[in-house]
Amino acid sequence: MFSRLPIIAAPMAGGPSTPGLVVAVGEAGALGFLAGGYLTPEELDHRLTEVERGSSASYGVNLFLPSPPTVGSEAVEAYRRRLEPAAHRAGAVLGTAQWDDDDIAAKVDVVCAHRPAAVSFTFDNPPAELCDRVRSETGAAVIATVTSVAEAATAVAADALCVQGAEAGAHRGVWRDDPASPEGGPSTPLLRLLADVGEVSALPLIATGGIMNGAGIQAALDAGAVAAQLGTAFLCCPESGTSSTHRRALLDGRFTQTIVTRAFTGRPARALANRFAREHSADAPAAYPEVHAMTRPWRQTAAAAGDAEVMHLWAGTGWQAVTEQTAADLVARLEHERRTAATPGG
Ligand SMILES: Cc1cc2nc3c(=O)[nH]c(=O)nc-3n(C[C@H](O)[C@H](O)[C@H](O)COP(=O)(O)O)c2cc1C
């Protein structure tokens, strides 16, 4: 739908999705995605320009829609009191737990001055006016990220849905984080969710969550998707901006599980089950981005020290299959495996 191959490198905010990765993925025939989350509008503009200068291949860009407040500040302050002793022992500080909208209006303006082939939104339902504006000013297809049948049935203004299964690495895209549920809402494995969403939406579906090889891509296509979006699989490509500590943690076998936790940011996200995740998952309130802002200085201190037990090590359930291939080699391998899996008799 967007590129020669039905393969998309997921937008990965916080470092991994460099312009170099997006360009390399696009040149290899798949669709690279810039991640607009956490960047300033100026940084986003710079990265979009770099991608457009680097390649004429199609690319996508992703933006976070603001999360409405969920739990009150009392729960956040209680979490702060529980974190403080350990943060002090580590020589780190906690930040101010403030809500922000990730500068969404300014970032939409920036995106509308560029020529992406796809613009995806995460964390809420993109309203019709926003979809219309992005479509008319950029010519892009608008993609809404959904995690449930109910969200899919409501996302009618978009041109396609990114269907995120329970296996996915990093934040779950739930529109309303249900504090009563550790996963923030219904958490359905990808292939099941694709089938269920196909019942309520006629939009093209992009499958994401736990896909690490071509057989997984083909299984998603067989389940009704037009393309598969892989995040974790690209984390250790040399072109990606993943920190060396995160790469090592993914590759060296010291972690044996992933966990969905609000401990790092206040929003359910799948990460390697390190000490921070294990010790704080039960206490962490549903308060994104307040908890993100509060824990960030501590996580930054840990990252600077290479401390994998405190950093957020986002990973999907298939992380043990991650490779250090270049983006071009990875895309070529995925497509070769996919074709093999698609051939009757293997
Ligand atoms: C490190 C990391 C950062 C991510 N950042 C974003 C993001 O900024 N926007 C978004 O829509 N999805 C983001 N995701 C989720 C991906 O879009 C996708 O749903 C997920 O990677 C799929 O699962 P997988 O990692 O098992 O392939 C991120 C995933 C990872 C691993």
Image: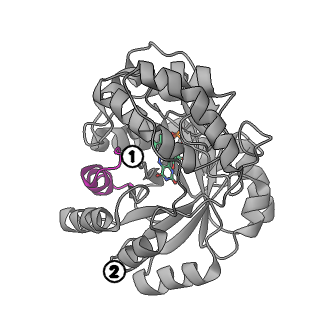
Q: Which residue is mark 1?
A: 14
Question: x, y (%) of residue 216?
Answer: 56, 38
Please name the residue that numbered disc 2 is placed on. 113
On screen, residue 270 versus residue 320, left or right, reads right
Which residue range is magenta in the image? 15-30
> Residue most toward the top?
254
Of the two numbered discs 2 and 1 on the same chain, state the one appearing first in sequence. Answer: 1
Residue 115 or residue 205, whichever sits in front: 115
103 or 166: nearer the eye? 103
Query: Can you say whether 344 is above or below 64 in the image?
Result: above
Secondary structure under tag 1 reads loop
Seen from this angle, which residue lies furthest bottom? 136
Element at label 2: loop
**117, 240: nearer the viewer:** 240
Q: Residue at x 28, y 67 (%)?
A: 42
The kind of residue tagged 2 is Ala
Q: Is residue 294 left or right of residue 151?
A: left
Q: Nearer the viewer, residue 263 or 218?
A: 263
Residue 320, visible in the rendered structure:
no
Quadrant where the C terminus lies? Answer: top right
Looking at the image, residue 41 lies above or below residue 285: below
Give, as a three-letter code, the residue at label 1: Gly
